[in-house]
Image: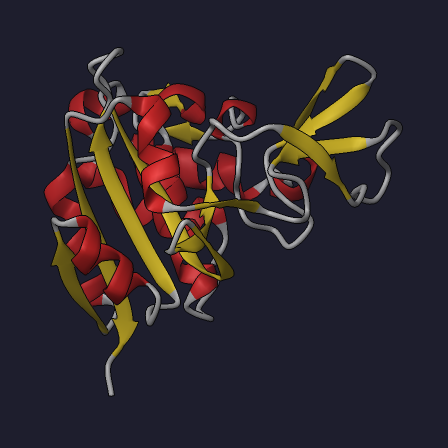
């Protein structure tokens, strides 16, 4: 049996909605109450390649969230399995950036890209699912984040809801079944609502690009 399939069988036994760790009298949850992953640091149980997902799982997490936003949800184990060949150094360095577009194209979606703030904001407002890739200025690491349009603006710029940005405050979310403590997650059930500029500012991003994913018409 291959490592990929062993990982798949193991990951299938996990309950994503109950991945949480106790912190300051609360349960810090991997997902919001709608099942979208907002905190990969709580995913140490999920295997990818030769590692687990808490440090380098942002690629598959972004794909998982985007599929949910597109109305085509699938379980985390399946998403990881489909991306196993895209992991760098057995997952130690995350997911190859160039693999995400083919992943969605093979599933029958259309993909386009934006590299300027004006274009990214304009296109993203009309797309149910978007994924930003950026290189952090301080840490010299990269990160993928899925996001969707939200109501409202700030300083004339549209707001978006970000999933797994890891820089939002921990706020209350509805408890999952069997939770023994109050539950929190990044952004809470209200969501991590920020502009593109506000997302990138604390990261001091050296480079970024947005992928827009839409259903073919």
Where does the image place residue 1, in percent across and percent down from the top left?
33, 35
Answer yes or no: is residue 189 visible. Answer: yes
* Residue 54: % across, % down: 45, 22
**Viewport quadrant of the C terminus:** bottom left
Residue shown at 23% from the left, 74% from the top: 108
Q: Nearer the viewer, residue 44 or 35?
A: 35
Above or below, 131 against 51 in this view is below
Question: Which is nearer the eye, 165 or 27?
Answer: 165
Determine which quarter of the picture holds residue 58. Answer: top left
Q: Is residue 181 left or right of residue 86?
A: right
Residue that lies at the very extreme toward the front in this rendered image:
155
Residue at image point 23% right, 18% down: 141
Q: Is residue 106 left or right of residue 186?
A: left
- The residue that appears at 26% across and 39% down in the rendered structure is 84
Judge whether residue 19 can be spotted in this image: no
Q: Quadrant of residue 123?
A: bottom left
User: Whole-percent x and y of residue 125?
Assistant: 35, 66
Res 139 quadrant in image? top left
Q: Position of residue 164 (x, y in %)?
A: 46, 37
């Amino acid at each position: 049996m291959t490592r990929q399939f062993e990982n798949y069988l193991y990951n299938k036994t996990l309950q994503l909605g109950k991945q949480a760790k106790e912190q300051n009298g609360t349960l810090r949850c991997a997902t919001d109450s709608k099942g979208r992953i907002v905190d990969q640091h709580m995913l140490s149980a999920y295997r990818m390649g030769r590692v687990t997902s808490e440090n380098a799982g942002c690629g598959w997490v972004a794909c998982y969230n985007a599929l949910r936003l597109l109305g085509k949800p699938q379980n985390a184990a399946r998403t990881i399995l489909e991306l196993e060949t895209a992991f760098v150094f057995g997952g130690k360095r995350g997911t190859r950036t160039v693999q995400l577009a083919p992943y969605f194209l093979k599933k029958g979606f259309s993909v386009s890209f934006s590299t300027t703030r004006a274009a990214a904001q304009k296109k993203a407002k009309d797309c149910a699912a978007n994924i930003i890739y950026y290189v952090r200025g301080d840490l010299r690491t990269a990160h993928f984040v899925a996001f969707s349009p939200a109501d409202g603006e700030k300083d004339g710029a549209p707001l978006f809801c970000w999933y797994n940005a890891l820089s939002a405050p921990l706020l209350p979310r509805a408890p999952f079944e069997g939770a023994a403590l109050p539950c929190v997650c990044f952004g809470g059930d209200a969501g991590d609502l920020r502009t593109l500029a506000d997302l990138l500012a604390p990261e001091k991003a050296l480079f970024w690009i947005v992928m827009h994913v839409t259903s073919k018409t």
